[in-house]
Image (cartoon, helix red, strand yellow):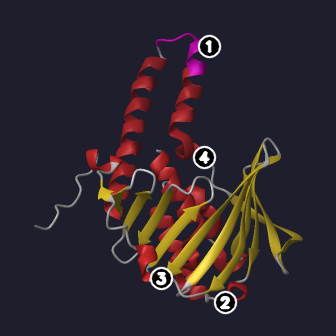
Amino acid sequence: MKLFKTVLTVAFTFFFFHAFAGVKIVTESVEHSNNEKSSGTLMIDGDLVRVETSESGEQSVIYDLKKKEVILINHKEKNWMKMTKKQIDDSKAHVKEQMKAAVAQQQAALAQLAPEQRAQLEAQMQMMMGNENKKPVNYLKTGKKSKWGDSECEIYDGMRGDIKTEEICTVVPKKLKCSLVEIERLKQISLDYAMDENDVSAWKDVKNMGVPVIHRSFQNGKVVVTNTLVSFENTKIPAESFKVPADYKQTSSPLDSVVPAPEKKK
């Protein structure tokens, strides 16, 4: 699941920038509970994307959107693994089926329990289902603006029912020097790689809301995490940036045990 989280976080952060040929992007994330900051650097050239994070510098992620492959590189161990989009899709379906089967077993046991025990079990079932039972996020325009670099962005409150769970600040595509057509296409790519569409719901209506450049997550009325697009620049990206070092060894992916990897050509 940690591997899925890596893929999801990266997908949410950068896929709409795929339109830029030769772009370097810097993002920043702040955990407000301890004020811990981390940054990410994204290098994009056509269908190829490389992601580096400041947390450890031990791992890189390379996305090949044309081949629909994801490569995770471990620099400390000098190895790498590959996942295909089909493996990711099939694994998501497999996880959902496992969750449904577990919930069905628990539901069958509910009738045999006392009220207090039943309530505890139902709470566990809700946690197991996660986003399956979440209400969709409804984004409401606040009429307020926030500072974003030398510009301003439009603030929206993300509501699940009566509870505010998110706040996004958006800009029109032209401020990012890209077209709405490109944004719509790349939004679909981010949805393709997300474990759950609820996690990238802020991208579903970029035509009317704009492109999120600041995203704040809320819990119990307080901001817990803020993700910000800090900067991007047009630049030439070396071709070697999208290649695995020759002396690194390929290892099996955790997804291989769920979905057989494609046979290697002899």
| Residue type, label 4 | Lys
Q: CA distance from mark 3 to mark 2?
A: 22 Å
What is the magenta range?
A: 112-120
Is 100 left, or right, of 41 in this rendering?
Answer: left
In front: mark 2 or mark 1?
A: 2
Residue 116 bears which disc, if any? 1
| In the rendered image, the vertical position of residue 129 relative to residue 8, given as above or below | above
Q: Nearer the viewer, residue 203 or 72?
A: 72
In front: mark 4 or mark 2?
A: 2
Q: Secondary structure at mark 4?
A: loop
| Residue type, label 3 | Pro
Whole-percent x, y for residue 27 in the image: 67, 67
Residue 192 bears which disc, if any? none
In front: mark 1 or mark 3?
A: 3
Q: Residues within 10 Å of mark 2 (few under 14, many from 20)?
A: few
Q: Is residue 192 magenta?
A: no
Residue 177 bears which disc, if any? 2
